[in-house]
Amino acid sequence: MTDQPETDQQELTLIDHLLELRSRVLRALVAVVAVIILLIPFARPLYSLFSAPLVSRLPEGSSMIAIDVASPFFAPFKLVMVLGLLLAMPFVLYQLWAFVAPGLYRQEQRLAKPLLAASLVLFYAGCAFAYFVVFPVIFTFFTAMAPEGIAVMTDINRYLDFILVLFLAFGLSFQVPIVIIVLVALGLVSPDGLGKARPYVIVGAFTVAMLVTPPDIISQTLLAVPVLLLYEAGIRLSRLLVKQGDESNSGEVLKR
């Protein structure tokens, strides 16, 4: 008889969690859709802005083209959808945090909250690095390497797919310090072990850069070098984390 009320209470708790999860997901979706709707009137200027790194470096008399009939509409709209998701991401992550945070310990919350914010900032920083640093370099290189008599005229849809892949690649690659700190905090790796693995990381960084960037040494280097620098930053930050953890544990021992 005593087990029945406890079972009912657990079921109610599970239902409450599912209802809260549905509410959080709906709020996140509404935020994304709202941002997309706000951006739709600016779809064409936004596409012009994102195509500027290539258009400004095309030879005189060249321009971008639309191969498919519907590309002039769908390419800007696709860009708006991606931007809507990226711009609404802080609110989406907040909804995720609000759902997960009550189940975390206070120490875990103190670590997770700044890491979540830093992860978002680093993703935006990676996208900005791609737009302001990588795109001008690689598009200048590509247009300059075109054989004589070949008109460089890129399809707007293929160009969008190309830059979105690079945005994603650089945004995710800039998460390296966050990944390192999380792995060290979980005790899966140590800062000293990460330092010893540096030669393998160098090879891995250039290998990944070769797979996700265009087949030229410039763009590969522009991705691999920041990853390696962020790897070193992650090691240094993880050492501070370990040091603070040792000091707090020593303080607890002294109190006892």
Image: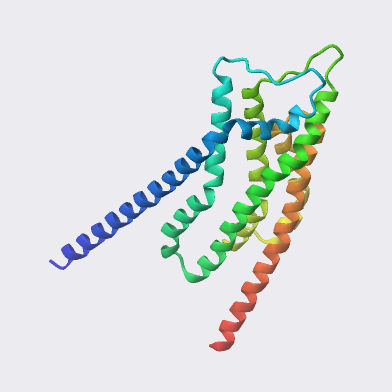
Q: Position of residue 183 (x, y in %)?
A: 60, 57
At a point 56% along the width and 46% down the height, the residue shown is 87
- Judging depth in this view, the residue of 61 and 134 nearest the camera is 61
Residue sitting nearer the eye, 152 or 238: 152
Residue at x 81%, y 13% (from the top left corner):
150
Image: 248 above or below 229: below
The image shows residue 86, relative to residue 152, as above or below, that is below
Which of the image's four quarters has the N terminus?
bottom left
User: In the figure, is residue 87 to the left or right of 165?
Assistant: left
| Percent position of residue 102, x then y | 41, 64
Q: Nearer the viewer, residue 225 or 35?
A: 35
Residue 28 appears at what percent x and percent y? 44, 48
Q: Residue at the spot x=54%, y=18% of the render?
A: 70
Residue at the outermost top position = 149
**Position of 23 compared to 170: left or right?**
left
Residue 118, image quadrant: bottom right
Query: Is 22 on the left-hand or right-hand side of 251?
Result: left
Asked if residue 28 is positioned above or below residue 7 in the image, the reply reads above
* Residue furthest out toward the bottom: 255
Horizontally, is 212 left or right of 251 in the view? Answer: right
Q: Quadrant of residue 3?
A: bottom left
Is residue 203 something one can see in this rendering? no
Q: Taking 92 as reference, is 219 above or below it? A: above
Q: Quadrant of residue 132?
A: top right
The number of callouts visible is 0
Residue at 80% of width from left, 28% of height from top? 57
- Could you tell me if residue 221 is visible in this image? yes
Residue farthest toward the left in the current orientation of the protein: 1
